[in-house]
Amino acid sequence: MAAVTAHRATIRQRATDLKEVQDCLRNLDAEQPDAVSRALSRYLTVRSVGYLEAVRDDLADLYAAASGNARLHRRITHHLRIGLGARPDQLLTFVGSFDSQWRDSLELLLDADDQVLRNQLGAMVAARKKIAHGDGEQVTAGRALGWADAALSIGRHLSTLFDSQP
């Protein structure tokens, strides 16, 4: 059970770290050059997608460890942290590979309010790709902050699916 406790602590710390970057951008001194805001916005975008990928894998690892079967745990963790991606369809497929009802639950969350979270997640992942390739000028502080909120919301939902004691 020590591994389960460690996974939960790591997941909580990831959320705390993302919120810290969010707070830095929110509270950025207006005297800072625009370049600082743009750079921090791009960084927050990259971190938001990375948060979802890491938490998805951490939760799958936690679930496999808590299930008790060592062989199953090794099999599941063998395919984690290999760049699966976090587009809406990728997250839904991943979650659905554990339980179709979990997939349905995540899809309901993503599609609520005229697909706000689905659209934010798709835009966030696309922006991260552009940033990685030297673009990303369209990322504003407002977008990055909204995307971070979306990532945290999706991460919380994933926690309720994979971990009965988040």
Image (spheres, rainbow, N blue to C red):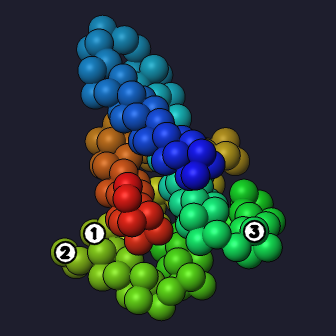
Can you see residue 45?
no
Q: CA distance from mark 2 to mark 1?
A: 6 Å
SS at mark 2? helix
Q: Position of residue 36 (x, y in %)?
A: 45, 20
Q: Is residue 91 left or right of residue 134?
A: left
Q: Is residue 14 left or right of residue 112?
A: right
Kindly check if marks 2 and 1 are in contact, taking CB atoms under 8 A apart as contact: yes
Q: CA distance from mark 1 to mark 3?
A: 39 Å
Kindly check if marks 2 and 3 are in contact, taking CB atoms under 8 A apart as contact: no
Q: Label 3: how many residues lie within 10 Å, few (<14), some (14-19) or many (20+)?
A: few
Kindly check if marks 1 and 3 are in contact, taking CB atoms under 8 A apart as contact: no
Q: Is residue 143 left or right of residue 121?
A: left
> In the rendered image, which quarter contains the C terminus?
bottom left
Residue closest to the eye, 151 or 30? 151
- Label 2 or label 3, whichever lies nearer to me, is 3
> Which amino acid, by three-letter code, is at mark 2?
Asp
* Residue highlighted by disc 2: 113
Residue 105, above or below 55: below
Q: Position of residue 101 (x, y in %)?
A: 41, 89
Q: Residue at x 79, y 73 (%)?
A: 71
Q: Position of residue 93 (x, y in %)?
A: 57, 82
- Label 1 or label 3, whichever lies nearer to me, is 3
* Residue highlighted by disc 1: 116
Residue closest to the eye, 120 or 48? 48
Q: Residue at x 57, y 64 (%)?
A: 66
> Which amino acid, by three-letter code, is at mark 3?
Ala
SS at mark 3? helix
> Which amino acid, by three-letter code, is at mark 1?
Val
Q: Residue at x 59, y 71 (%)?
A: 67
Judged from this view, the residue extending furthest toward the bottom is: 100
Which numbered tag is attached to residue 70? 3
